Image: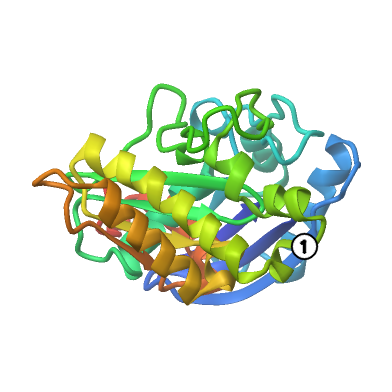
Amino acid sequence: MPTVLAIDIGGTKVAAGLVDETGALLDRSARPTPVGGDAAEVFRAVLEAVAAVGMGDAVACGVGCGGPMTAGGEAVSPLNIPAWQEFPLRARLAEELAVPVHVDNDAKALALGEGWCGAARGVGAYIGMVVSTGVGGGVVLEGRLLDGAGGNAGHIGHLIVEPDGRLCPCGAHGCLEAEASGTAIAARTGRPAAEADPDERRRAGRLVGRAVASVANLLDLRLAVVAGSVALGFGQIFFEAAQAELDRSARLDFSAGARIVPGLLGDAGPLVGAGAVALRAVGHPIGVR
């Protein structure tokens, strides 16, 4: 039974785990992402998380990392990790690990995981989303994960949902990430996103629904699977507001009735998704090409 090492790298924490061919997360460890540290310090946190779980019988390593990045994660520049600018992630990990390393965007990895053994299993067209420290997405059409020229397709966090809204780390104004991410909510309210009041939770859901409606209208899909600490932590009030906005804004024959549902993999989703990146790369069938 093939087992892979899975690594998830985000702006708040880095995590590692072992994932088997069924999508089971066998073990995991996490470390805080160093705040204000240099590139080497962030990379050390990744290696510490890996060391805590070990390699086991892993035949490959899959990594989900925030973007943007160049194809295959050869150079990553996560907006939420300023210390990594064009950081050679895949090559550096390949130097440290004795297995092949495969890197993709963390939200695309989550989309793979939810299509493999989560809320989008058996669905050929959907968007998987992470609403957490940042906001990201991965799009599956006709059973295939969209990559784009540099591996960055699906960046729904940078759809404009509030014209002339808050400045986003990408440099634009009013992006979904600048308005509804955990970082943005904390900046707007002066307290952690987990302490957001009901109106803030509804607002975040409404903006996510607005972005999903644009994607549903553009790409002819009828399902959005949304995970991440903000979305899942905000719960029913968030998802009801998101669905109401989607119903209001997706009115074409092919997009009306589109649904927003919580990810089924919960907090294991990012690592299961990273495992899916590796398993797909070595030829193990996961249901998404």
Find residue 276 and report its horizontal and vertical position in percent. 42, 57
- Which kind of residue does numbered mark 1 sit on? Pro
Q: Nearer the viewer, residue 31 or 203?
A: 203
Label 1: few (<14), some (14–19) or many (≥20) C-alpha neighbours in 10 Å = some
Which residue is at 57% across, 29% downward? Answer: 69
Which residue is at 35% across, 69% downward? Answer: 118
Find residue 159 and report its horizontal and vertical position in percent. 46, 34
Find residue 265 and report its horizontal and vertical position in percent. 45, 72
Q: Is residue 83 above or below residue 139?
A: above
Residue 285 shown left or right of residue 225 in the figure: left
Residue 104 shown left or right of residue 98 in the figure: left
Quadrant of the rendered structure where residue 78 is? top right
Q: Is residue 274 visible?
A: no
Residue that mark 1 sits on: 192
Which residue is at 21% across, 53% downward? Answer: 222
Which residue is at 72% across, 45% downward? Answer: 96
Colour mode of the rendering: rainbow
Quadrant of the rendered structure where residue 179 is? top right
Quadrant of the rendered structure where residue 201 is? bottom right
Q: Nearer the viewer, residue 49 or 269?
A: 269
